Amino acid sequence: MTENFERINSSGDFFELLKRSGHNAQQSLSGIPKNAALEIPQGTTVLAFHYKDGIIVAGDRRATAGNSIMYDRCDKVIPIDDYSLMAIAGVPATAFEMARILSHNFEYYRRSQLRAMSTEGKVRALSKLLKDNVAMALQGVGGVSPLFAIYDTQQNKAFLYFYDMLGAEFQILTHVATGSGSPMIKGVLEHENLWGLSPLAERSEGEATSLSIRLLQTAAQFDSATGQARPEDKLYPIIAKVTKDGYQFIRDDEMETIYKSSMNRS
């Protein structure tokens, strides 16, 4: 028993450990029977872009199922480890499970190998989970299209990736958005990056957060699945940053001030 554990442990591969223990990531993500007549909650919209100090990641809070609003306080930006965040568009249940598996995977590797997993390894780990989930995505009951933001402390550089539902990964050098409200956001981001007062990568944290709020409010004007901020209910988008100091979420009390300033027309 000890020898077997040590042999598994030596690789630092959490997915292999699950498999040899009688579990695997695919099983944990595929508990819904094929062709199930279910209205699966969907989460949209999320965006991310490089700014002066790292990467800003933001999302609205609405989760829908068909034409129904299921929940208005869904957290679509999820911490994975101290230096990485995943933003989700798609089925929250699947995405949250992927986030838990990723988090355990990174921590297991760190403890078993006595060092952190490389950025490349972390990026590919999420790709593997998505590939294992292809069957559910094709059935229309488990599709997830995530964004992954990470700060590499060895290279002193922030990296941003977009994934399609089949697990293909794409490094993003400027900006990205996904979800039903993303078409409007992508256009504005491109305009801001090319012809705004300054390129996105040169903007301060305040400028980046204000832009994120405005983008999500704009998307909500044209997409019913994207939730608007409601100051009267203290409901605001979720915004986080990934920098050399790790990830940090903008607190609700700060969001109130930022929102009021961002919505000022002057």
Image: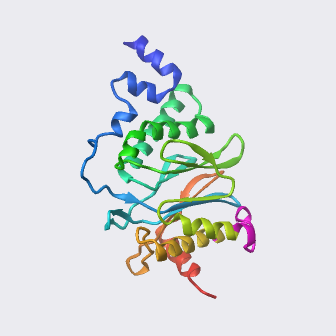
Which quadrant is home to the C terminus? bottom right
Residue at the (62%, 37%) spot, across then down? 120
The relative height of residue 237 versus residue 105 in the rendered view (above or below) is below
The relative height of residue 6 versus residue 240 in the rendered view (above or below) is above
Q: Is residue 15 left or right of residue 34?
A: right
Write down the region rendered in magenta.
Answer: 193-206
Which quadrant is home to the N terminus? top left
Residue at the (48%, 77%) spot, across then down? 221
Magenta stretch encompasses residue 14 = no
The relative height of residue 21 versus residue 37 in the rendered view (above or below) is above
The relative height of residue 90 versus residue 63 in the rendered view (above or below) is above
Where on the picture, by quarter, is residue 228? bottom left
Q: Residue furthest bottom?
A: 266
Coordinates of residue 109 in the picture (x, y in percent): 52, 30
| In front of the other: 162 or 157 | 162
Residue at the (72%, 73%) spot, across then down? 196
Coordinates of residue 176 in the picture (x, y in percent): 60, 58
Asked whether residue 150 appears in the rendered view, the answer is yes
| In front of the other: 94 or 136 | 136
Q: Is residue 53 left or right of residue 2?
A: right
Asked whether residue 240 appears in the rendered view, the answer is no
Coordinates of residue 48 in the picture (x, y in percent): 59, 59
Coloring scheme used? rainbow
Residue at the (47%, 15%) spot, across then down? 7
Coordinates of residue 154 in the picture (x, y in percent): 69, 40
Magenta stretch encompasses residue 200 = yes
Q: Is residue 61 left or right of residue 71?
A: right
How many labels sit on residues?
A: 0
